[in-house]
Amino acid sequence: MTCVQTIQNRAAVFVIGMAVLTAAPGKAEAAPQTFNTALPVAKDQFVFREQFLYRKASDDPAPTDRELDVLGAVSVLGYGINSDLAVFGAVPYLDKQLDLTSPAGQRVTRDSNGVGDARLFGRYTAFHDDAPGRTFRIAPFAGVELPTGDDDERDGLGRLPQPLQSGSGSWDPFVGTVATYQTLDYQVDAQISYKNGFEFGDELRLDGSLQYRQWPRELGAGVPGFLYGVIEANLLHRDENEINGIEDGDSGGTSLHLSPGLQYITKRWVVEAIVQIPVVQDLNGAAQEDDFTVLAGFRVNFGF
């Protein structure tokens, strides 16, 4: 579940995407790694994704020379209610460290760790067009980000700055639509979403992903798995954060990330990794810019 957004907001969007060309129960397929997919979770099946992340942000326009490092994991569980409707829950755990130069010229470290804001949402297949070897689907989704993370963490220097807080302290609804076109050789996903953020600013996202089978080049019997190359793009616009009802002029803005990655897919499980690289960061004031984010993890699907 990912720009200068706080890491809990980025992590929350790394949600499950499971694809089924033939609707075979429990079959795993390629899917985006930084956002959702329109392809269904089979009825009465579960899908679990664990995604580990490392984020580095050291490009600081302010004289404080801030360096932010974030380690974390995002756990996501999805359930197929029927062939059209699936529900999901995502919970991040984050360990954040910020090094900066104080007004006195001393280098200080501030850190936090804990559970971030969880997300609950449902996704419904509103349109599908299936044919031998390919499928096209459109699925709107809606949910809420819950204030499960601590939003008032402190250390010896006082209240931690907003990017170090584990949570937002507010109930933030979000909506969106995702479309997927899948063939035997490749898959294309596109998503638009909007989140009404009461503390961290509203967010508008446009996401795209292409997954292309690299190995085996020709389909045949007896192949244990498939290797896919992945390229994704994430365009994010965020309004300014609010602190005690006052807008923070050093937050928000527009950013674009390009992300190359790999997925190895078997019938029941997937291992995957991707690197998010900022190519545009038009941020407000002294907002800190990202260096990169690395995501790596696995997906499994199962039923009882």
Image (cartoon, rainbow, N blue to C red):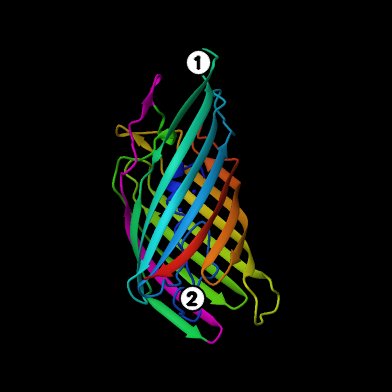
Mark closest to the chain's N terminus, 1 or 2? 2
Relative horizontal placement of residue 36, taking residue 218 as reference (left or right): left
Estimate the x, y position of residue 257 in percent, counting from the top left. 57, 51
In the rendered image, the vertical position of residue 60 relative to residue 304, given as above or below: above
Seen at 50% across and 35% down, the residue is 287
Relative horizontal placement of residue 64, taking residue 48 as reference (left or right): right
In the rendered image, the vertical position of residue 131 relative to residue 34, given as above or below: below
Given contact means CB atoms under 8 Å apart, are the residues at marks 1 and 2 in contact? Answer: no
Task: Sort mark 2 into few (<14), some (14-19) or many (20+) by Cα contacts within 10 Å.
Answer: some
Q: Which amino acid type is marked by label 1?
A: Pro
148 inside magenta stretch:
yes
Asked if residue 61 shows in the view, the reply is yes
Seen at 40% across and 78% down, the residue is 127
Q: Which of pointers 1 and 2 indicates the residue nearer the eye?
A: 2
The quarter of the picture where residue 226 lies is bottom right
Estimate the x, y position of residue 105 in percent, counting from the top left. 55, 14
Question: Where residue 20 is drawn, which disc sits there?
Answer: 2
182 inside magenta stretch:
no
Relative horizontal placement of residue 170, taking residue 279 as reference (left or right): left
Q: Quadrant of the C terminus?
A: bottom left
In the rendered image, the vertical position of residue 69 relative to residue 171, given as above or below: above
Task: Sort mark 1 into few (<14), some (14-19) or many (20+) by Cα contacts within 10 Å.
Answer: few
Direction right: furthest residue: 217
The quarter of the picture where residue 101 lies is top right
Direction top: furthest residue: 104
How far is mark 1 from mark 2, CA to CA?
56 Å
**Relative to the observer, which residue lies in front, 209 or 296?**
296
Question: Where residue 103 is drawn, which disc sits there?
Answer: 1
Estimate the x, y position of residue 112 in percent, counting from the top left. 43, 32
Q: Which amino acid type is marked by label 2?
A: Val
Part of the protein shown in magenta = 132-159
- How many numbered circles are shown? 2
